[in-house]
Image (cartoon, rainbow, N blue to C red):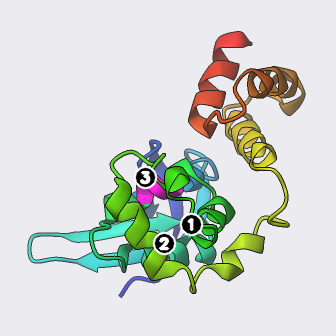
Amino acid sequence: MIFSLQGIVQELTPTYAIINVQGVGYYVGISLMTSQTLTLNHETLIYIQQIIREDANLLFGFNSRQEKEMFNLLISVNGVGAVSALILLSTLSLSEIAVAIMSSNSALIQKAKGLGTKTAERIIVDLKDKVQKFGSIEGNISVPVDNKIKDEALSALEVLGISKRMSEKIADRMMKQNPSISVEELVKQILKNI
């Protein structure tokens, strides 16, 4: 079982990365959260969850053990596959997922593309007692979701070489106009307005 990979990021997209470990390129499915922490042609260490099926040997990578743990909890729920779990991890932060589950907020979970009402409710029922520790990973639960979304968007833009100072005012303006904006949409809007 592969626990982690340390190597050069040979290819990078929002959904997968190729990690070159001593000449061998590993195709690793990743979330947007992990994608934002990687830099093309730089060395990285990512935690791996290997899923072996009859027809495939799949690798999923995470920038933290906590994200990997949340992924494993999500795929343990009947009806939630690896792709759905990655989409949820790309849509919400770990603490947002935990708070949504603990507060039975299925509408927030359903913001992830492809997760319907029944699946969201199943996630809440199955994981309610298992996610408390994730609620405080990224600070206090009472910290507004807005700040997390803004921080993630600004870090993604920094990875692209855009300074935090340049994008912060635009981010504040966009978030006032649309308080429930997603990280991806905020990044797009900032890029359009720079």
Q: CA distance from mark 1 to mark 2?
A: 6 Å
Mark 1 or mark 2, which has the lower sequence index? Answer: 1
Task: For residue 104, say whether it is visible.
Answer: yes
Q: Which mark is residue 124?
A: 2
Amino acid identity at mark 1? Ser
Identity of the residue drawn at 62% across and 75% down = 66
- Position in image of residue 92 (x %, y %): 58, 53
Taking the image as shown, residue 184 lies to the left or right of residue 59, namely: right
Q: Which mark is residue 104?
A: 1
C-beta proximity under 8 Å, tags 3 and 2: no
Front residue of this view, candidates 58 and 10? 58
Mark 3 or mark 2, which has the lower sequence index? Answer: 3
Mark 2 nearby-residue class (10 Å; few <14, some 14–19, many ≥20): many
User: What segment carries the magenta color?
Assistant: 86-90
Q: CA distance from mark 3 to mark 2?
A: 17 Å
C-beta proximity under 8 Å, tags 3 and 1: no
What secondary structure is the magenta-colored segment mainly? helix
Mark 1 nearby-residue class (10 Å; few <14, some 14–19, many ≥20): some
Which residue is farthest top? 193
Q: Which mark is residue 87?
A: 3
Amino acid identity at mark 2? Ile
